């Protein structure tokens, strides 16, 4: 093989390596659709787990943009009411649905929460967005029956709609009072990396589908 031909082959190989990150990861918008737990309530916006997610994606050269449209105090009913317009505006490739905590705190019927979340999942499917459903749990003082029915909403919907599921956003935090703000409800800045890790391990397989 002549030197000229060898040089051409090397240049072709190097060019393909330089282009690999863009070719391997299609990128797009990741929509965070949640309540105060995702809206960085009581914290600077850049300290929330959604902002940390954007930083991690950039650090790992994954060409995605995180759009966080979470609203403090949001219920599944409010989320269902605005999902069509949000999907139309942002056109996400992936949507992280983190809703239901406020339904539970208000003692709303799990059946209503299930119907509202189903509307959100159905709309996301029609928009061809992959869904990561994020589960919550209620404390024991709500009663065994209610807490069981509440948790089952997420597992049942994930199974029915074949979506990825984070079983519990606050996994690993319940017994650590220092990780919550004075209201005992909202995570501190120090807790945000834990939330990110709980989401990330289920989000990463969805990102790999774009390879």
Image (cartoon, rainbow, N blue to C red):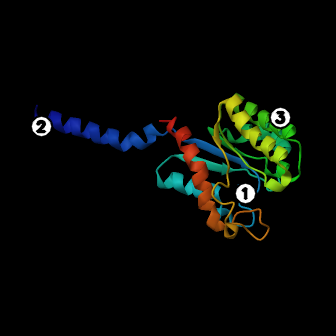
Residue under pointer 3: 115
The image shows residue 177, relative to residue 96, as above or below, that is below
Foreground mark, 3 or 2, reads 3
Residue under pointer 1: 39
Instruction: Please state the horizontal and vertical placement of residue 38, each as a whole percent of the image.
Output: 70, 55
Report the side of 5 relative to 17 (left or right): left
Residue under pointer 2: 3
Q: How far is the residue under mark 1 from the one under mark 3?
A: 23 Å
First in sequence: mark 1 vs mark 3:
1
Q: Residues within 10 Å of mark 3 (few under 14, many from 20)?
A: some
The image shows residue 176, relative to residue 211, as above or below, that is below
| Towards the viewer: 182 or 50 | 182
Residue that lies at the very extreme toward the front in this rendered image: 144
* Residue at position x 63%, y 61% in the image: 192
Q: Is residue 66 visible?
A: yes
Count of all numbered marks drawn on residues in the image: 3
Report the side of 152 relative to 109 (left or right): left
First in sequence: mark 3 vs mark 2:
2
Instruction: Please state the horizontal and vertical placement of residue 144, each as a whole percent of the image.
Output: 82, 47
- Mark seen at residue 13: none
Q: How far is the residue under mark 3 from the one under mark 2?
A: 68 Å
The image shows residue 5, relative to residue 142, as above or below, that is above
- Secondary structure of residue under mark 2: helix
Q: Residues within 10 Å of mark 1 (few under 14, many from 20)?
A: many
Q: Which quadrant of the figure contains the N terminus? A: top left
Location of residue 23 by image quarter: top left
Instruction: Please state the horizontal and vertical placement of residue 39, each as a whole percent of the image.
Output: 72, 57
* Residue at position x 53%, y 44% in the image: 204
| Towards the viewer: 201 or 123 | 201
């Amino acid at each position: 093989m002549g030197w000229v031909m060898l040089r051409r082959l090397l240049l072709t190989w190097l060019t393909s390596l330089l282009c690999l990150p863009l070719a391997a990861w299609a990128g797009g918008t990741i929509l965070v659709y949640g309540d105060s737990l995702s809206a960085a309530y009581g914290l600077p916006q850049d300290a929330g787990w959604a902002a940390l997610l954007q930083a991690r994606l950039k650090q790992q050269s994954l060409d995605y943009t995180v759009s966080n449209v979470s609203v403090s105090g949001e219920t599944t009913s409010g989320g269902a009411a605005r999902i069509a317009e949000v999907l139309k505006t942002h056109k996400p490739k992936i949507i992280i649905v983190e809703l239901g905590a406020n339904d539970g705190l208000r003692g709303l019927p799990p059946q209503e929460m299930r119907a509202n979340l189903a509307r959100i999942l159905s709309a996301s499917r029609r928009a061809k967005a992959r869904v990561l459903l994020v589960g919550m749990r209620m404390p024991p003082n709500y009663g065994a029956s209610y807490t069981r029915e509440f948790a089952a909403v997420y597992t049942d919907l994930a199974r029915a709609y074949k979506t990825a599921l984070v079983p519990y956003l606050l996994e690993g935090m319940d017994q650590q009072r220092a990780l919550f703000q004075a209201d005992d409800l909202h995570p501190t800045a120090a807790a945000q990396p834990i939330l990110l890790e709980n989401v990330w391990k289920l989000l990463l397989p969805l990102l790999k589908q774009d390879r």
